[in-house]
Image (cartoon, grey):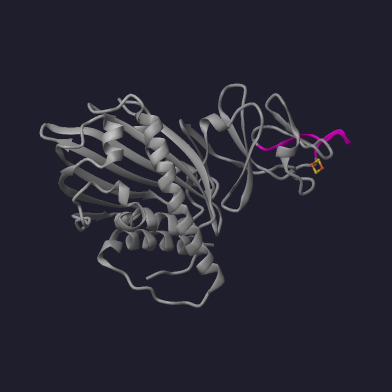
């Protein structure tokens, strides 16, 4: 297993779950999501208890789920309440129901030990819930492991090679990380960029002219195995003019594939009227290039399993901490000791 299971992961966005079924593979299990009459969401194992047939291939009768093979019917807790060929369902006929928390735009599911969800809530995402913030987002499926995604987004020195158009003019190298904060379960870093004129994309999303110089502060955080957050603040002489937050919900589909729920949020005094469309386009293109590299690395790992020690550089500091936390969590779940 290459990812922890005792976690909250984003299963879907709120607008994906409606009157029908939303079927998704999460931590290598089939899961079906459905919105109930009271507006809440149920997440059930997407396999009938009778035979290996997906419940999402059946139909709904209100809040009940009817299997499309022999008609066994389940309530929102996963209990089988009807078997058409006999009077009563067999005792214990049940599919697993996963705990769900909807905090739009994310729908979180707890995939770990039953009851463990009561010990910790899903991570907070305040910039996705108002207070002056606006957001746009998309979901992508990437053929790469969860760890590769976290490591990639905790080291943005790749922008010079991969996304040179994102770098403000005149900046030749990213300053080293000023601060890497580590707790038992989270890592975050911060860095300031020297003042520089706006890159074309910054001028487009802010509506500011690209002649004056601005400062930028960047932070990045491995918040949990299921959430990465990066902030990017453009600062004028009187303080911040535009705050951008890139939130990634990372959800393992399997050992070698991950669902990515990308959300871009903004607020500030310098915001162009079409900021949402522009940010969505710029970061969609960026993500496409990022995912191509990550999928190539995953193929390299799959093709050559020979253990080898890769060289690390200073910019890898935060990523290495995140890797250590993920590895510890996986080993704890396996019950094996770790250094
Ligand atoms: S497989 Fe679902 S009712 Fe038989």
72 relative to 161 in the view: left or right: right
Q: Is residue 298 visible to us here?
A: yes
Q: Is residue 147 visible to us here?
A: no
Circle count: 0
The quarter of the picture showing ligand 1: top right
* Residue occupying the point 36% across, 53% down: 153
Query: Which quadrant would the C terminus be assigned to in this image?
Result: bottom left
* Residue occupying the point 27% across, 62% down: 315
Q: Residue 193 appears at what percent x and percent y?
A: 18, 49
Q: Residue furthest right?
A: 85
145 relative to 131 in the view: left or right: right
* Residue occupying the point 25% across, 65% down: 314
Q: Which residue occupies the foreground of this view, 45 or 91?
A: 45
Q: Which residue occupies the foreground of this view, 127 or 65?
A: 127
Q: Which residue occupies the foreground of this view, 66 or 81?
A: 66
Q: Residue 143 appears at what percent x and percent y?
A: 54, 55
Q: Residue 260 appears at what percent x and percent y?
A: 48, 46
Q: Is residue 79 part of the magenta span, yes or no?
A: yes
- Quarter-of-image position of residue 231: top left
Q: Residue furthest top?
A: 38
Above or below — where is 184 with respect to 212?
A: below
Query: Which quadrant would the N terminus be assigned to in this image?
Result: bottom right
53 relative to 26 in the view: left or right: right
Q: Is residue 256 part of the magenta span, yes or no?
A: no
């Amino acid at each position: 297993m290459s990812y922890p299971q005792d976690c909250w992961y984003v299963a879907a966005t709120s607008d994906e779950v409606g009157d029908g079924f939303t079927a998704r593979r999460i931590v290598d299990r089939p899961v079906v999501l459905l919105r109930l009459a009271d507006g809440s969401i149920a997440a059930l194992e997407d396999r009938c208890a009778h035979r290996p047939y997906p419940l999402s291939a059946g139909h709904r009768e209100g809040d009940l789920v009817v299997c499309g093979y022999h008609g066994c019917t389940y309530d929102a807790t996963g209990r089988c309440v009807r078997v058409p060929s006999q009077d009563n369902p067999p005792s214990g006929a049940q599919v697993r129901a996963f705990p769900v928390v909807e905090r739009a735009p994310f729908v979180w599911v707890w995939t770990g030990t039953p009851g463990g969800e009561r010990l910790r809530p899903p991570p907070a995402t305040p910039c996705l819930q108002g207070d002056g913030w606006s957001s746009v987002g998309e979901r992508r499926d990437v053929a790469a492991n969860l760890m590769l995604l976290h490591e990639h987004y905790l080291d943005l020195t790749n922008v010079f090679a991969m996304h040179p158009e994102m770098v403000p003019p005149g900046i030749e190298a990213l300053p080293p990380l000023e601060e890497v904060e580590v707790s038992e379960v989270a890592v975050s870093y911060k860095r300031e960029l020297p003042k520089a004129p706006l890159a074309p994309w910054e001028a487009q999303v802010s509506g500011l002219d690209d002649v004056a110089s601005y400062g930028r502060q960047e932070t990045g955080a491995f918040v949990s195995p299921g959430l990465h957050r990066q902030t990017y603040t453009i600062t004028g002489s009187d303080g911040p003019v535009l705050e951008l937050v890139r939130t990634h919900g990372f959800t393992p589909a399997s050992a070698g594939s991950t669902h990515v729920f990308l959300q871009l949020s903004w607020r500030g005094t310098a915001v162009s009227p079409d900021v949402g469309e522009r940010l969505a386009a710029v970061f969609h293109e960026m993500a496409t290039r990022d995912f191509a590299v990550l999928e190539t690395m995953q193929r390299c790992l799959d093709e050559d399993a020979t253990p080898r020690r890769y060289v690390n550089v200073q910019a890898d500091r935060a990523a290495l901490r995140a890797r250590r936390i993920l590895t510890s969590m996986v080993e704890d779940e396996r019950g094996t000791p770790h250094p």
